[in-house]
Image: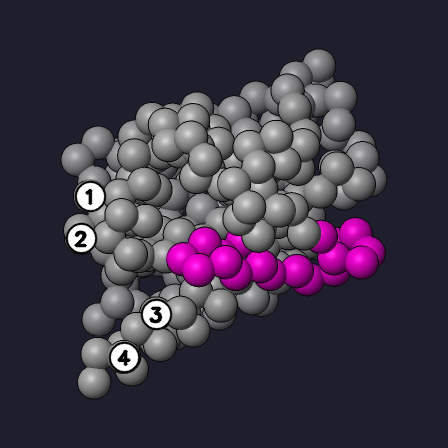
Amino acid sequence: MKRILMILTSHQQMENTDSKTGVWLGEFTDPYYEFIDQGYQVTLASPLGGKPPVDTMSELTEHVTGANRRFTDDEFAQSAFKHTHTLVGLSATDFDAVFFPGGHGPIWDLANDELSAKLILEFFDLDKPVAAVCHGPAALIKAAELSPGLLAGKKLTSFTNTEEKLVGRSANIPYKLEDKLIELGADFKSALLPFLVNVETDGLLITGQNPLSAGPVAKALIEVLEKEIESEF
């Protein structure tokens, strides 16, 4: 059985506003059920442990996905979400891949979390895939600081500057993720139009641009893991 570690944000405060952020629920639930339906075991973790904050915007009717509704009735998943592990003591040796959902929170906490960064580097060192969607790729920032050149020339994506502007939160964040990843040497890719599905795979690194890309990123990760299984025979 394949084991996936999903690392969620613990951060909810935004700048210059009373609005809160946190996990964008569909970016967790869509991949979660892609993994579960494939028979994978999923472990949830976050910097502070316990229940991560949820961006209330992601619970509005227009953003609710089928996976969100499934999650509402899933007592096991609800309990796991309320009791996420902390990152202390986690090791890439115990998992086959790591996945970082978005929501704006990661640009504050996961972007600066050394334990998360060391886990990412450990996954890469063990030739295990790292996947992230929307603002989840912010977790790569600290990893690139610990391992200079990590993202140099790497084809990847994240929530774009244009999308940030269109959702009206540009004034409430400390930096734009697209700019930061490019500064770190990434070969940043985006869809032709904002909010279209976009998944980029570069070796062991799999990234998605926005909420609609969350499920497709999970499917791309599953493809990578299934190819590994085939290569073992």
According to the image, label 1 marks what residue?
91
Q: Which mark is residue 231?
A: 4
Identify the residue at image location x=67%, y=52%.
189
The quarter of the picture where the C terminus appears is bottom left
> How much space separates mark 1 and mark 4, taking CA atoms?
24 Å
Q: Which residue is farthest bottom?
A: 233
85 or 200: nearer the viewer: 200
Asked whether residue 151 appears in the rendered view, the answer is yes
Looking at marks 2 and 3 on the same chain, the residue that comes earlier in the sequence is marked by 2
Tell me the kind of residue under disc 3. Answer: Leu
Its colouring scheme is one colour
Residue 203 on the magenta segment: yes
Asked whether residue 67 appears in the rendered view, the answer is no
> How much space separates mark 3 and mark 4, taking CA atoms?
10 Å
105 to 227, vertically: above or below: above
> How much space separates mark 4 and mark 2, taking CA atoms?
20 Å
> How much space separates mark 2 and mark 3, taking CA atoms?
15 Å
Residue 119 on the magenta segment: no
Looking at marks 1 and 4 on the same chain, the residue that comes earlier in the sequence is marked by 1
Residue 92 lies left or right of residue 134; in this view the side is left
Looking at marks 4 and 2 on the same chain, the residue that comes earlier in the sequence is marked by 2
Foreground disc of the pair 4, 2: 4
According to the image, label 2 marks what residue?
94
Tell me the kind of residue under disc 1. Answer: Ser
**In contact (CB < 8 Å): disc 2 and disc 1:** yes
Tell me the kind of residue under disc 2. Answer: Asp
Foreground disc of the pair 3, 4: 4
